[in-house]
Amino acid sequence: MSYFVLMIVIFVVGYTFIALEHPIKINKSATALLLAAIMWAVFALMGPGFDHEALVIHLGETAEILFFLLGAMTIVEIVDKHEGFSIITDKISTTNKRKLLWIISILTFFMSAVLDNLTTSIVMVALLRKLIDDKHERWFFAGMVILAANSGGAWSPIGDVTTIMLWIKGNVTAAKIILETFIPSLVSLLVPLTAITFMMKGHVTRPEIHGKDDSHPSISTKQSNIIFFIGVGSLLFVPFFKTITHLPPYLGILFGLGIMWVVTEIMHVSNKKNYSKLNVSAVLQKVDTPSVLFFLGILMAVAALQTAGHLDLLSKSLDKIGDIYIINLIIGLLSSIVDNVPLVAAAMGMYPIAEAGHFAVDGAFWEFLAYCAGTGGSILIIGSAAGVAVMGMEKIDFIWYLKHISIWALLGYFAGGGVFILISKFILHT
């Protein structure tokens, strides 16, 4: 068996173990790390020639995402520990499941366009923990957060990493991507949202608010407000930081984390003993490290496929189809299995920007690619950064998501795609 085929077999087996994490009782992070190491080892030992520089480049790209994730999760945890989210949760008075589902989903959809789908998912899961006590009820809401975050990120130039790639490289402009993908993205959310709404009945039970004690020091309203607005401001500052400095987003999130660290140190300077639970050092110890390592493993495993040429071969195979809409729909479906970043990068490399037609700046191919790569990741829980983050934070079972959310995400994906094709063929690109 050649190394090329063997790597595919190893990836499929590893992916299956990840999907069956709960039945086989092996943590998905362990499987992902083994998967990455074995695939790179097979490529190094059996491949045509191992390029250490390629490994370093992929590790650097993965590290950018991991440090962004770590920074965002830490900022959200700091705000949560200081009871900052009470500003929002206190405004959401309803306990009706259907109303709450719509509020959370629409809020996530628009927040994702302003922040990004990964950051928004982390923030919204933190909010859900304040609003819903039952874990399995919360999973349905968390599933909709993933769908809403990915749909919201697809129509914004700063909402999803793949849309950011297309925007920065000049394949699309900010105004056009918003104008021409907003409605399809909204449809991709409304279809599953409507379907899941009919499955919801009754009211949610909010977590009990425990009395004040030393393990959870009381925070003044002023302190909560300060930390909340600095935290949200830090997250909102990231896209501006990137636009102004042209530096990667993880540096912006680390800047925000540094600001929050300094502020909390000053805020609790006279009460460090009583507020030891609120120190950033203590918060960092609560960060979900296994989820970060899972992210590392799965991205590096996909990077091995990219380096070995599997994704390039896949792109060339798709090129034979000819129809740009079918090609993009397939890319979107694949992005639920394989990370959408290398898929979009491969597509951008395969199709240069043309003077006119579907491949021109703001052409139908690039806009539909942004939609499909962004929303297609919702079909499986590990198909997007938002899904991986929520899966780690809420310990959502892969199979549970597949049974309860995937079918609705798939219907929403095709519904939004159909709307885009209709608009593109008969209104915009006639």
Image (tube, rainbow, N blue to C red):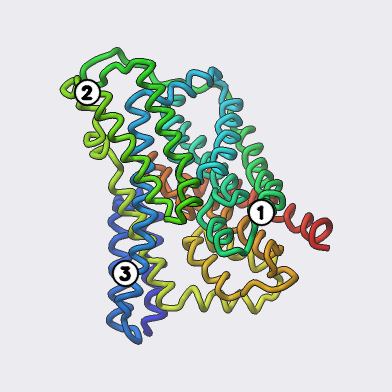
Q: Which residue type does callout 3 highlight?
A: Val
Quarter of the image with the N terminus is bottom left
Picture coordinates of residue 92 (x, y %)?
53, 21
Picture coordinates of residue 101 (x, y %)?
57, 31
Disc 2 on helix, strand or loop? loop
Q: Earlier in the sequence, mark 3 or mark 2?
A: 3
Residue 189, quarter of the rendered image: top right
Marks 1 and 2 sit apart, C-alpha to C-alpha, by 46 Å
182 relative to 423 in the view: left or right: left
Q: Are marks 1 and 2 in contact (CB under 8 Å)?
A: no
Q: Which residue is mark 2?
A: 275
Q: Which residue type does callout 2 highlight?
A: Tyr
- The residue positioned 38% from the left and 35% from the top of the image is 76
Q: Which residue is mark 3?
A: 56
Residue 281, quarter of the rendered image: top left
249 relative to 332 in the view: left or right: left
Taking the view exactly as shown, the residue that stands out farthest to the left is 273
Quarter of the image with the C terminus is bottom right
- The residue positioned 36% from the left and 29% from the top of the image is 80
Q: Are marks 3 and 2 in contact (CB under 8 Å)?
A: no
- The residue positioned 20% from the left and 27% from the top of the image is 276
Residue 86 visible, this angle: yes
Crowding at label 1, few (<14), some or many (≥20) Cα neighbours within 10 Å? many
Q: Which residue is mark 1?
A: 177
Disc 1 on helix, strand or loop? helix
Q: Earlier in the sequence, mark 1 or mark 2?
A: 1
